[in-house]
Image (cartoon, helix red, strand yellow):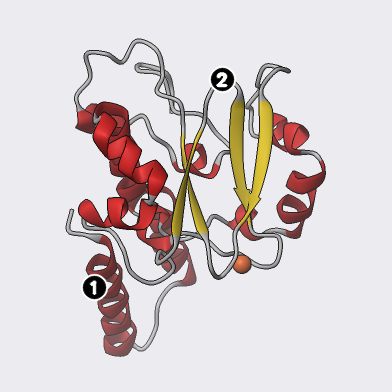
Amino acid sequence: MAGSGTSVEARAAALEEILVEKGYVDPAALDAIIATYERDVGPRNGARVVARAWTDPAYRARLLTDATPAIAELGFGGRQGEHMVALENTPDEHHVVVCTLCSCYPWPVLGLPPTWYKSAAYRSRVVIDPRGVLADFGVTLPATTRIAVHDSTAEVRYLVVPMRPPGTDDLDEAALADLVTRDAMIGTGLARTPGAAT
Ligand code: FE
């Protein structure tokens, strides 16, 4: 896939063209397009960044030191991704991202924010009870794992680097990227283990 910014703009332009041509678009069809961008297309960029970090220690170091240029190395950048910070999950610490004020989100690596990310319930509750919110997402962490909640702002956007699942030593970068879900990069999920259901 071509990189980020251009791709987003191309999609917006294509969508606009349809609207202009037909003068009408089925809202359900529009929802489907948005859902695809939230879940499938957008987060694939971030998944490539994570897979590279998992396989290339020098890249991982660059990503954790200064994420914006490291992400740009893979061709992703632009609006809403100018000041990126990568947060690496470990057995001791699990990172979760929220925007308590609105819905700040790293577009170049994750696409459009999911509806729940913009909800008042998520934004308020994840700060007060992160472990409870993670449980709602089906994520149960050991009691010894500290949960750190990070508040996105207009200035800083976060990308969570989930832990590499066990049993993935033989996988190449593309196969690893397939295991990296959107939620894993927000911190409300974990990377999938190979062969597990989506
Ligand atoms: Fe915001």
Look at discs 2 and 1 and give the one toward the viewer: 2
Residue under numbered circle 1: 10
| Residue 163 to residue 103: above or below | above
Q: Earlier in the sequence, mark 2 or mark 1?
A: 1
**Foreground: 119 or 48?**
48
Q: Position of residue 136 (x, y in %)?
A: 70, 34
Task: Please tell me the numbered disc located at residue 134.
Answer: none
Q: Position of residue 42 (x, y in %)?
A: 36, 54
| Residue 151 to residue 79: above or below | above
Which quarter of the figure has residue 76? bottom left
Q: Mark 2 touching mark 1, by CB under 8 A?
A: no
**Foreground: 162 or 14?**
162
**Foreground: 166 or 178?**
166
Residue at the image point whose x is 43% and y is 49% from the top? 39
- Tag 2: Cα neighbours inside 10 Å, few (<14), some, or many (≥20)? few
Residue under numbered circle 2: 91
Q: Give the structural element (helix, strand or loop) at label 1.
A: helix
Q: Position of residue 152 (x, y in %)?
A: 59, 59
**Foreground: 126 or 34?**
126
Most extreme residue toward the top, as rendered?
Answer: 167
- Indicate which quadrant contains ligand 1: bottom right
Structural distance between the alpha carbons of marks 2 and 1: 40 Å
